[in-house]
Image (cartoon, rainbow, N blue to C red):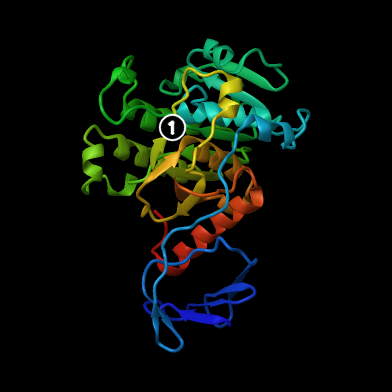
Amino acid sequence: MAAELAVHSIPGISISISGRQKLKLSDHQAFTLPRSPYLFRPKFPLLVKNRNVVKGEKHLRAVEEEQLQASAVDTQVSETDPSSSKLVLVIGGSGGVGQLVVASLLNRNVKLRLLLRDPQKATTLFGNQNEDILQVRKGDTRNANDIDPSVFEGVTHVICCTGTTAFPSRRWDGDNTPERVDWEGVRNLVSSLPRTLKRLVLVSSVGVTKYNELPWSIMNLFGVLKFKKMGEDFVRKSGLPFTIIRPGRLTDGPYTSYDLNTLLKATAGERRAVVIGQGDKLVGEVSRLVVAEACIQALDIDFTEGQTYEINSVVGEGPGCDTEKWKELFRSAQIQQMAFGSPAP
C-alpha cells in the first residue's frame, strides 16, 4: 500500500513511496527514483496523510563496501583500456587513503600519474609498473614553485587525498603542518590545475563547518578543521568541476608499509555498509577503503559535480565497486538534504 508523506515543516514538499519512489517538490516539479532498497529513511517525525507520526533513521545504508580482495581482483572487469584518454593524477598517493586509491585504479587498468615528494616510494609501494599505466613525478604542493606545469599535461581527473595529523606529531616534521598541507597545499594545487579538467575530487573531513563547536573545537586546537575548510572553499570558488568527500574518523590502516599485492587484499572487515550524508551532520567512523572507492566513483558520476558529501561505514554489506549502487547512495543523500535540510555547506 502506498504511503504518502508530507514534510510538516516544509510546505509544498511531499514524498510518495510505492512501486517507484517519488519526491514531489511542488505541484509542477517531481523527481522519480528507481525502486531501491537503499533509499533513505529520515530520522525525525514526518506527518502522514492520516496524521500518524512515524519515525525513521537519518542515514543511508547500501549493499557492499570496496572489496579489494584477490578473489574479487580475478573477476573484476577493467574500467578502461590503457589507451583511453582518461588520465588520473593522484596527489597524496603514498598516504593511507591515497595508496588504496592508486592500488584500486591500477587494478582497474586506469592510467595514473602520481605527484610525490619522494618518487622512490611509488616503487616500494606499487612495484615497477609500465609507464603507460603509472607515471611518477616529483613535486610538493606545499610550495607553488615545486609544481612543474608538465605534471598536468594530459590530465583529465585529479584526486587529492593529502593530509597530516590534527595534533603535533612526527608527521609534522619538515613543516608538514595542517596549514601547510590542508590549506596552502590545496590552494597551490588548485591554482595550477588546467581549466580543461573534468573533475577534481578533494578528501576533507567531517566537522569542518563546526570547528568552533565542541567536540570539534578540540580536534581543531591546531587548526586542522579550519584549514581543511579553507581548502574546500578555495576549491568551490575555483570554477573547476569538483566533488568534496568528507570522511569520518579513518579506520583500517593506514597501510603505509604495504606493497601492491597486500593492498589489493585489504578489506574493511565487517564495516562494509556505506552511510552518505550532506550538511556536515554525520558523526562516526569510516574505512579508508570505503573513502578510496567513494573518490574513484565520484570521478565519473555526473551529478556529484559541485557536491560535498560526508561518508561513514558501518557493519553490514556495502556497494563494493558497483557504480549503480554508489549512484543510489550519492543521489539519496542529495534528495534527503534537499527535502529535510538546509543547503549543504
Q: Nearer the viewer, residue 101 or 174?
A: 101
Residue shown at 55%/12% (left/top)?
124
* Residue 74 percent coordinates (x, y): 72, 31
- Which image quadrant is residue 230 in? top left
* Residue 149 percent coordinates (x, y): 57, 22
Q: Nearer the viewer, residue 216 or 192?
A: 216
Q: Is residue 245 above or below residue 28?
A: above
**Outermost bottom residue:** 50
Residue shown at 70%/34% (left/top)?
86
Residue at image mark 1: 186
Residue shown at 47%/35% (left/top)?
288
Three-letter residue code for mark 1: Val
Secondary structure at badge 1 equals helix
Q: Is residue 21 above or below residue 206?
A: below
* Residue 266 percent coordinates (x, y): 54, 30
Q: Is residue 25 above or below residue 269?
A: below
Is residue 328 visible to the viewer in this orientation of the structure?
yes
Quadrant in which the N terminus appears: bottom right
* Residue 38 percent coordinates (x, y): 55, 60
